Image (cartoon, rainbow, N blue to C red):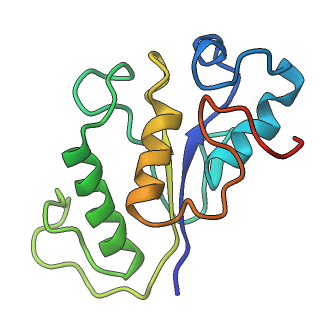
Amino acid sequence: MSDIRIGICGWRYGPWRKDFYPKGLPQDDELAFASRAVNTFDEAGFARFLELLPHSDVELYSSGYTAQALRRWKQRIQHWSQGRQADDAQLVVPGPPPRRAARDVYCYFDNDQKVHAPYDARRLLQKLSLDHELMTEPGVVPEVAL
């Protein structure tokens, strides 16, 4: 079975300290908190397999994703993780693509100007039922030590 990971790019964004990170969280604990709020994050913007970098739904880097848009990302990710092509793919080469084996999918939300990335990542994780083992939740003081 393929691996699906949904996360964020980076973690040291000033606006996140007023929203995503719980009030009073020491800056030295931000990486630990962020890494437990999603199931992957991309510090360097690089992954080996299928990597997605959604920047926003409407306004580049600034807007969040609607429930409908996240459902569409869920469908695409499920197709790609099963080796199929998403039905709305814009292909460089016309015609049906060759069938592929299951593949890992890494999705890093990068719409960080208004603190949407960690919330959109978490909502997509929930839609894919991949949030059950995560130890922190955006904006909520963790019950476990970081």
- Where 87 falls versus 33 (above or below)? below
Q: Position of residue 25 (x, y in %)?
A: 80, 21
Observer-nearest of 100 and 68:
68
Q: Is residue 94 left or right of residue 99?
A: left
Observer-nearest of 135 and 118:
135
Q: Position of residue 124 (x, y in %)?
A: 41, 52
> Which residue sits at x=86%, y=19%?
26
Q: Is residue 12 left or right of residue 103?
A: right
> Which residue sits at x=22%, y=78%?
97
State the quadrant of the C terminus: top right
> Which residue sits at x=78%, y=29%?
30
Q: Quadrant of residue 99?
A: bottom left
Q: Is residue 82 left or right of residue 13?
A: left
Judged from this view, the residue extending furthest toward the front is: 143
> Which residue sits at x=60%, y=25%?
20
- Where 50 falls versus 40 (above or below)? below
